[in-house]
Image: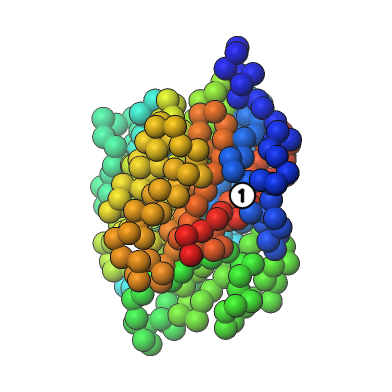
Amino acid sequence: MERRKFLQIPIAAVPAFLASRVFGQATLSPLPLKVKFPVVVSTWDSGITANNAAWPLLEKKGTALDAVEAAGRASEEEPSCCVGLRAWPDRDGRVTLDASIMDGDGGCGSVSFLERIKHPVSVARKVMETTPHVLLSGEGAQMFAVANGFPLEDGKLSPDAEKEWKKWLEKSQYKPVINIENRNVSELKNPPANAGGSDIAPPYRFDDGSFNHDTMATAALDSSGKLAGMVTTSGMAFKMRGRVGDSPIIGAGMFVDNEAGAAVSSGVGEEVIRICGTHTVVEQMRAGRSPEQACREAVRRIVKRDAAKAKQMQVGFLALSIKGEIGAFAIQKGFTYAVTNSEWPKGKVFEAKSYF
Ligand code: ASP
C-alpha cells in the first residue's frame, strides 16, 4: 500500500526549472519525469498510436503485458507507421520482421527474420507462453505462427515500399540513416508536406527512400505495479537479407525487470547489441540512476567506441522505472517518445535530450 502511494507522486511535483522547454510539438524531457501509474510510454511521435491502443486496457486495470501487446499490434497495423508488412523491405525486396515481448518476471519471447505474418509481436508472445524457447527465427518462426492460427499474408510489397526499393536499387547504397522525428525535417532536403503539422508523425522518407525510423517500442507499468515491454520492427531499411537487429534480442532492444525497470531502444541495432543496450539501462536503474541518467550512460558507451561513427547515426533509449519515473536519451536530437496516463489520456510527446 505504501509503495503504491509512493508510486503515485504527481508530475506537478517536478520543479518548474526542470520542466520542459517546448521544441516543436514535443517537450524536452524533465529529469526525472515521475508520473501516476498505470502509464504507458512508446518511442517516437507515432507512439501516440501505440499508447492509444494500450491505454484503454491499463485504465481498466489490465495487465502491462496485454497493454504492450496491444500497442505492438496497433503499430503493426497503422498504415502511416514504419513497421509491419507495409514497411520498407531488405535489399532483396522482402519485408522481414523482428519483435520481442517481455514481462517483469523474466518471461520473454521473440521472433526474428519473420516473413508474411502481420503481427510478429503476438507471435513473440506465443513463443513466450507456449514454448520452452525464447527466440524463433525465419522459416521456423513462420511455421510456428501458421500452426498457431496466424494467417500467412501474400508477401507483396506495398506500392510505396516497392517504389522506394526500386529507387534504392539504382544506387544500392547501404548506409544507416540518422533517425529523427518529423519536427526536424525542415533541415532536410525533401520535407513532407505535413511536417510538424499533426500530432501523429507520418513516416518520413529520406532521399535514399528509407524511413526516418523503423521501430516501435513500448513499456508499460500497470495498476498492480508490474512492468512489461515490447519492440516491433522491420529493421533497417534495405538491410542485407538475413540481417537481424537489436529488437528481438532480449537485453539489446528491450529488457524488463520488476525489481528495477523497463527499457526499449530504437536506432542502429548493431550498436545497441554491442553494448547490451537495454540491459545496461535497466542495470543502471537498479544501481540507483534515474531512467534518463541510465539511458545517457548507455548512449555514452556507444559514443565512446567510435565518436565519429556515432555522429552519423541515431540510437535512442527510453526507460520506465518500477517507481514510475520516465526518462530517455539519444545520440542525436529528434528522438521523441509518447507518454499516456490518467493525466495525459490522449498522450503527450516529449523529446529526449541528446549527446550531440
Ligand atoms: N533498431 C532497429 C534495428 O536495428 C531499427 C530502428 O530502430 O530504426 O533493426
Q: Which residue occupies the foreground of this view, 329 or 86? A: 329
Query: Taking 9 as reference, is 24 above or below it?
Result: below
Element under disc 1? loop
* Direction from residue 353 to residue 147 in the image, left or right: left
> Disc 1 designates what residue?
29
* Direction from residue 113 to residue 26 in the image, left or right: right
Q: Which residue occupies the foreground of this view, 167 or 312? A: 312
Q: In which quarter of the image is ligand 1?
A: bottom left
Q: Which residue is drawn at 34% across and 53% down?
A: 301
Q: Which residue occupies the foreground of this view, 306 or 247? A: 306
Residue found farthest to the top: 1
Choose top left, top right, bottom left or bottom right for residue 90.
Answer: bottom left
The colour scheme is: rainbow
Query: Taking 17 as reference, is 148 above or below it?
Result: above
Q: Which residue is drawn at 68% across and 38% down?
A: 14
Residue found farthest to the front: 17
Give the class, few, some or many, for how many residues have Cα within 10 Å of label 1's Cα (few <14, many ≥20): many
- Which quadrant does the N terminus fall into? top right
Q: Which residue is drawn at 69% across and 76% down?
A: 193
State whether residue 30 appears in this view.
Answer: yes
The x and y percentages for residue 305 are 29, 60
The x and y percentages for residue 192 are 64, 76
Choose top left, top right, bottom left or bottom right for residue 236.
Answer: bottom left
Q: How many labels does the image show?
A: 1
State whether residue 129 appears in this view.
Answer: no
The x and y percentages for residue 248 are 35, 47
The x and y percentages for residue 56 are 66, 35
Q: Which residue occupies the foreground of this view, 349 or 97? A: 349
Choose top left, top right, bottom left or bottom right for residue 113.
Answer: bottom left
Q: Which amino acid does label 1 sit on?
A: Ser
Q: Residue at x 39, y 49 (%)?
A: 298
